[in-house]
């Protein structure tokens, strides 16, 4: 079964949720949370995009992110890779830091009802989750940044300031116990959502959004391509192009092909049919099997981490 598409385009605003693997804590102390914020600042400064809001808890974090010159997927790849490398080094951790694919919901442009519903959900999340007793004193959300920009200068605050005259009015809205219709829609989709807005938005905007995103991802040196993956594999395994694309029982070549399949699926976002065609696998089930072999082999995953470090150095 193919993965659901990410609906994205320049200027799109997304609610993103990233969880620790098996929902385990991956932001164990305040220094970890502070480092994640530094990662956000660093990557935003290099590749663009805007952050409208965030909240960092112990085992997950929320972002309200506006796509810039690279896709949301590539922005998140850089963010998660950078933080995961830090976490593994600090704690001697082996394995996946984050749980599968992050969740994302595309918010209808210009629809302030849903925009503020999501922003409210995000910034009050640590309080609702019982992480803190006083949301104003909790440092790891964007709550105070809209009217005290010195706290986190990278937060885009113009939409909030256009509706609320001061922090107290904004805080009253954030802490309100009222459950709106927009709240009900958001809560009903929290486990399996991709977009939030009117039916017209869902029906009319998605096709043009996908086209624009595919065009954006084909251009610029910031993007990881199949050619990047193949060049890495050929160099690491000292293979010819023909060897990489041929079925064989040779263990070295088979491992190289597995790693290539994993990277094409998880970094270039090819579907299994595309990988099957490019690498010459018998069927999509064969592709799935070989990707799982990589995920269960610490040695092969070492090549994935090396590839990510190389891509991170290109940012």
Image (cartoon, rainbow, N blue to C red):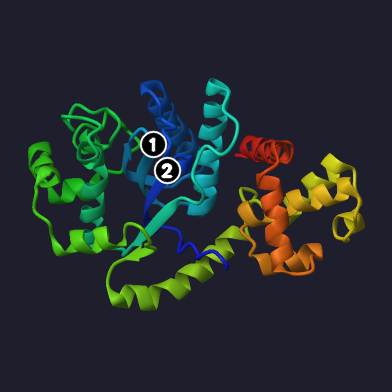
Q: Would residue 281 appear left or right of 113 to someone viewing this image?
A: right
Tell me if residue 59 can be seen: yes
Image position of 265 (left or right of 47): right
Q: How many marks?
A: 2
Task: Answer yes or no: is residue 263 visible.
Answer: no
Label 2 CA crowd tier, 10 Å (few <14, some 14–19, many 20+): many
Residue 140 sits above or below residue 267 on the image:
above
When the figure is inspected, residue 166 is found, relative to residue 3, above or below; the finding is: above
The answer to whether marks 1 and 2 mark residues whose Cβ atoms lie closer than 8 Å is yes
SS at badge 1: loop
Identify the residue shown where x is 32% and y is 57%.
190
* Residue identified by numbered label 2: 19
> Residue 252 falls in which quadrant of the image?
top right
Read off the residue under disc 1. Answer: 59
- The quadrant of the rendering that contains the N terminus is bottom right
Indicate whether 111 appears above or below 170: below
Assign the C terminus to one quadrant of the image.
top right
Residue that appears at 74% across and 36% down: 299
Spatial CA span between label 1 and label 2: 6 Å
Compare residues 286 and 28 and report the one nearer the observer: 286
Q: Give percent across and percent down for residue 269.
A: 61, 58
The residue at 69%/53% (across/down) is 291
Tag 1: Cα neighbours inside 10 Å, few (<14), some, or many (≥20)? some
Q: Position of residue 310 (x, y in %)?
A: 69, 37
Circle 2: element type: strand
């Amino acid at each position: 079964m193919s993965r659901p598409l990410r609906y994205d385009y320049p200027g799109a605003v997304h609610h993103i949720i990233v969880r620790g693997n098996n929902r385990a804590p991956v932001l164990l102390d305040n220094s970890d949370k502070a480092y994640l914020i530094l990662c956000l600042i660093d990557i935003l400064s290099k590749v663009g995009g805007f952050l409208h809001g965030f909240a960092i808890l112990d085992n997950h974090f929320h972002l309200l992110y506006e796509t810039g010159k690279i896709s949301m997927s590539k922005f998140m790849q850089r963010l998660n890779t950078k933080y995961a490398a830090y976490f593994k080094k600090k704690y001697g951790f082996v394995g996946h830091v984050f749980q599968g694919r992050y969740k994302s919901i595309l918010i209808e442009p210009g629809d302030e009802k849903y925009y503020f519903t999501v922003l409210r959900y995000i910034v009050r999340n640590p309080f609702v989750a019982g992480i803190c007793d006083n949301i104003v004193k909790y440092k790891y959300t964007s709550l105070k940044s809209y009217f005290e920009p010195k706290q986190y200068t990278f937060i885009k605050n113009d939409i909030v300031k256009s509706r609320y005259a001061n922090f107290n009015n904004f805080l009253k809205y954030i802490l309100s116990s009222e459950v709106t219709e927009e709240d009900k829609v958001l809560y009903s989709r929290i486990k399996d959502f991709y977009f939030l807005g009117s039916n017209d938005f869902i029906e009319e905007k998605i096709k043009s959004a996908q086209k624009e995103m595919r065009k954006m991802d084909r251009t610029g040196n910031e993007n990881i391509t199949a050619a990047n993956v193949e060049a890495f594999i050929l160099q690491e395994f000292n293979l010819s192009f023909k060897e990489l694309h041929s079925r064989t029982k040779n263990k070295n070549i088979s491992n190289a092909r597995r790693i290539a399949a994993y990277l094409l699926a998880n970094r270039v976002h090819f579907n299994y049919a595309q990988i099957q065609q490019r690498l010459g696998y018998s069927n999509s089930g064969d592709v799935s099997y070989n990707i799982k072999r990589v995920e269960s082999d610490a040695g092969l995953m070492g090549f994935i981490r090396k590839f990510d470090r190389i891509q991170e150095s290109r940012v």
